Amino acid sequence: MRSNSSATQVALDELIALAALAHGTSLARSRRSTALRSGGNASRWRGRGVDFRESRIYQPGDEIRHMDWRVTARSGKPHTKLFEEEREQGLLLAMDLNPGMRFGTRVRFKSVQAARAAALLAWMATAAGDRVGALGFGGGVNGEVKPAGGRRGALHVLRALRDWDAAADGSIQAPLSRALARVRRLLLPGMRLVLLSDGFSTDADVAQLLPQIAGRHEISLVLLRDALELAAPPPGRYALHLGATRRILDFSDAGVRGAWTERFAASRERLLGLCAKLGIRVIELDGDADLRRALAPLLARNRHSKVVT
């Protein structure tokens, strides 16, 4: 890993410079649900809206208070009203700042790479005219940036990413479910969620909260990982440091090497299994990965490009 601080700490100037990578791209929408792809366009819905759009034949489940009695009387067939709601295009970035993110053996910490990915996504969102907000959780951080548009909106997010990284306490762990409960308050109709995490904070309550959000919003997961989590190091004795604590791990023992990878895999698989079940798009991101290439499944060349899935 590089010895300079930008490998272990989030640098604002680096996040700002990523604006150049966002040129000519926007966030691609998933094909999983046509309802969630409406974005900033007018969408039909049953309920109170901004403007009346049209009437159609009544269908089981339509609310009786939205019956169009005038058309019903004229046609002799029950009709219900459809309204038009402006659904705001926007992006919410949920950043995991738990202790496990402050680790990396390839170029940079997972926390730094996550912030870089979030910054690139923020620049693309604002360049496309979308609003962008952020939420930080874990490491004692409970920060929020309300969605805003334009360069100023992106800069607010970038400064928060820098400040949250500096403030995160490497000894405080927070469950993902607590963050998802906060996410539900910030997500407005039509907004998308990108969760940036290594998955190690996934707890049992996530299985209840994540489907509730996925039923209303498009979600993508950027799963941070490190090579040392995927495979144990070569046999030998290694010193690990966590704050003032120093431990020696003996990887000459095959059992230790097997348990090492199994524990990391189990932590990831809980979240990956939920994402697969809910149709949530997952991008696995290494610390040394090229951001533009790694995030390609989330990108479209412009607002009218074919969606990449």
Image (tube, rainbow, N blue to C red):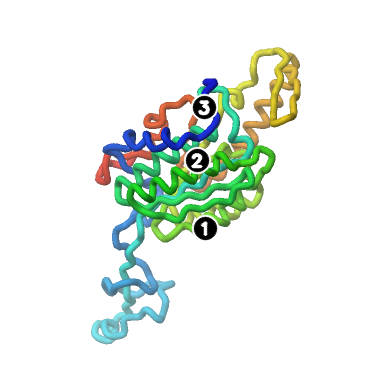
Residue 64 is left or right of residue 259, and the answer is left
Tell me residue 1's x, y (percent). 54, 20
Residue 258 is left or right of residue 12, and the answer is right
Determine which residue is flagged by label 2.
Answer: 162
Amino acid found under the numbered disc labelled 1: Arg
Residue 13 is left or right of residue 80, and the answer is right
Residue 276 visible somewhere in the drawing: no
- Give the residue displayed 31% in from the left and 85% down from the top: 69
Residue 198 figure quarter: top right
Pointer 3: residues within 10 angstroms few (<14), some, or many (20+)?
A: many
Pointer 2: residues within 10 angstroms few (<14), some, or many (20+)?
A: some
Tell me residue 112's x, y (percent). 51, 33
Determine which residue is flagged by label 1.
Answer: 184
Amino acid found under the numbered disc labelled 2: Arg
Label 3 – label 1 distance at C-alpha: 32 Å
Residue 93 is left or right of residue 240, and the answer is left
Dot in front, 3 or 1: 3
Tell me residue 4's x, y (percent). 52, 23
SS of the residue under disc 1: helix
- Give the residue displayed 32% in from the left and 42% down from the top: 26
Amino acid found under the numbered disc labelled 3: Ala
